[in-house]
Image (spheres, grey):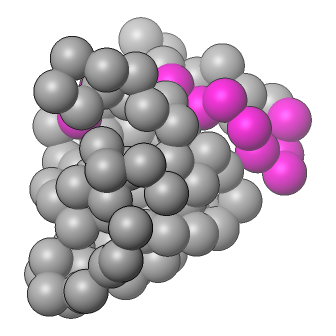
Amino acid sequence: MAKASLELARGEMIGKSVRVVEAKNKSLVGIEGSIVDESKNTFTVETEKGRKKMLKEQISLETTCKGKKVVIDGRFLLKRPEERIKTKVSG
C-alpha cells in the first residue's frame, strides 16, 4: 500500500471528497460527494442527489491526499474511525 493510502487508512475520512471507482453494486460506481458520516461498516456520502449510504467492504474510493489522487479499498477502512487511528500499518 502506498504511503498516502496508509495515511488515509489511519486518518479522518469525514469531510473528504470522494468518488466510487469500484463496487460490487455497479450502480454505486461514479458516485461523487463528501463523506458526512462514518460507522464501522459504512460511509454516508452527500451527493448532488442526496445522501447515499454504502458498505465499506464493497467499494473502492478515489480521493486526494497531499495533492495526489489515491484509490483505497474500503476493506482497509473496516473499523470505527476512533479505532482505525490506533491501528498500526506497515508499508
Q: Percent x, y for residue 27?
A: 81, 31
Question: How would you classify the magenta stretch by its main secondary structure?
Answer: strand
Which is nearer the eye, 68 or 80? 68
Residue 52 location, x and y as percent? Answer: 50, 40
Please say whether residue 50 is visible from this viewpoint. no
**For the point 86% across and 35% down, which residue is it?**
26
Which residue is at a point 71% across and 59% down the rendered structure image?
58
Picture residue at 19% right of the left edge, 48% below the top: 14
Specify whether 20 is left or right of 70. Answer: right
Task: Say whether residue 32 is left or right of residue 35.
Answer: right
Q: Which range is magenta? A: 16-26
Q: Quadrant of residue 31?
A: top right
**Residue 59 coordinates in the image, percent (x, y):** 65, 50
Q: Is residue 21 left or right of residue 16?
A: right
Total labels: the figure holds 0
Judge whether residue 62 is colored magenta: no
At 58% from the left and 69% from the top, the residue drawn is: 75
Report the front residue among 40 and 90: 90
